Image (tube, rainbow, N blue to C red):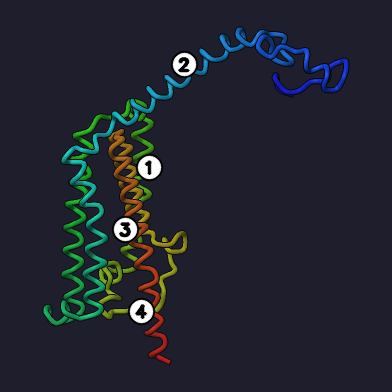
Amino acid sequence: MPPGDALPFAGDCCGGLSNLDYSKHVLGTGQSASRWQQQIWPFRRKKKKVDVRAMARLLGYVDVTDAGFTAAVLSIAFNPLFWNVVARWEHRTRALSRAFGSPRAACYCLGTVILLLNCVRSHCFTEAMKSQPKLEGLDCRWGYVLGLAILAVGTLFVISSFLALGFVGTFLGDYFGILMEAKVTSFPFSVLDNPMYWGSTAVYLGWALMHASPAGLLLTAVVAISYTIAMLYEGPFTEEIYRRKGAESE
C-alpha cells in the first residue's frame, strides 16, 4: 500500500479520522506534509527540466526549413505520385503506347524517367544529410557497420526483385497491358510483399546510419510513408487488372 493511502487506525471508524491534521502529516509516513513536499517536488521539477533540454537538443539536429531538406522531402513525395498518376493515365488512355508506337517502348521510356527521378531523389537525400549536423551517438564504427549491413540487405532485396520481375515488370508494365503469366513467388517475394519498396527504404536507412544523420533518419521515415501510401493505391489497382484478365480468359 503506497504512502498516503488509508490505513487502519484505533478508535472509531470515521470519528477517529476527524482528529487528524492533514496539513501537518502524510498518512502512513510520519512526515509532515511540508517536509515531504520539499523532498519530492524539487526532484520532479528537476526531471522536467532535463526532459525539456533533451527534447530541444534532439530537435536541434534537424533544420526542417533548410532548402536542401525541403528539396529532399519534395523529391521523395513526388516520385511515387508521378509514376502512379502517369501509369494510371496510360492504363486509361493508352496515350503513351500510341505516342511511342508500342506498349513495351512506352514502358521502357517511363522506366527510364523513373530511374532518373530516383537518381535526383538520392542526390537530394545525400545533400540534405551533408548540410545537417551528425548525431554523436551514431558517429562511430559500429553505427557505420550497422548502416552498411542494412544497406547491403536493402540492395539485395532491390536487385533480386528486379531480376525476378524484369524491367517491364518492375516499371509498371501491367499498366501498359503487358501482364505476367503468373504471380512471382520466388525470393524475395517469398519473404515479404513489395520487397522492392522495403528494400529501397532499407537502403536509405542504412545510408542515413552510415552518415550518422538525424536528417537522413527523418527523410527515411518520409520514404517509408510515401511508399506505404503508394502500396495502398497500387495493390488494389494491380489486383483489379489481373482479375479482369482472368475474367476475360474464362
Distance between the alpha carbons at the discs numbered 1 and 4 = 37 Å
Q: Quick one: label 2 or label 4, which is nearer the N terminus? A: 2
Q: Looking at numbered disc 4 in the image, what kind of residue is underneath it?
A: Ile
The single residue placed furthest to the bottom in the displayed view is 250
Rendered view: 10 above or below 76: above
Query: Of helix, strand and loop, which one carries label 3?
Result: helix
Tell me: 207 left or right of 65: right
Rendered view: 184 above or below 53: below
Q: Which residue is mark 1?
A: 149
Who's the residue at 38% across and 84% down the image? 244
Image coords of residue 147 (percent x, y): 35, 39
Q: Which residue is mark 2?
A: 46
Of residue 72 and residue 168, the one placed in the foreground of this image is 72
Q: Quick one: label 1 or label 3, which is nearer the N terminus? A: 1
Tell me: 113 left or right of 150: left
Image coords of residue 125 (percent x, y): 22, 44
Residue 245: which disc?
none
Q: Nearer the viewer, mark 2 or mark 4?
A: 2
Q: Looking at numbered disc 2 in the image, what kind of residue is underneath it?
A: Lys
**2 and 4 marks in contact (CB < 8 Å):** no
Q: Which residue is mark 3?
A: 159
Q: Nearer the viewer, mark 1 or mark 2?
A: 2
Q: Quick one: label 3 or label 4, which is nearer the N terminus? A: 3
Q: Which residue is mark 4?
A: 241
Rendered view: 169 above or below 14: below
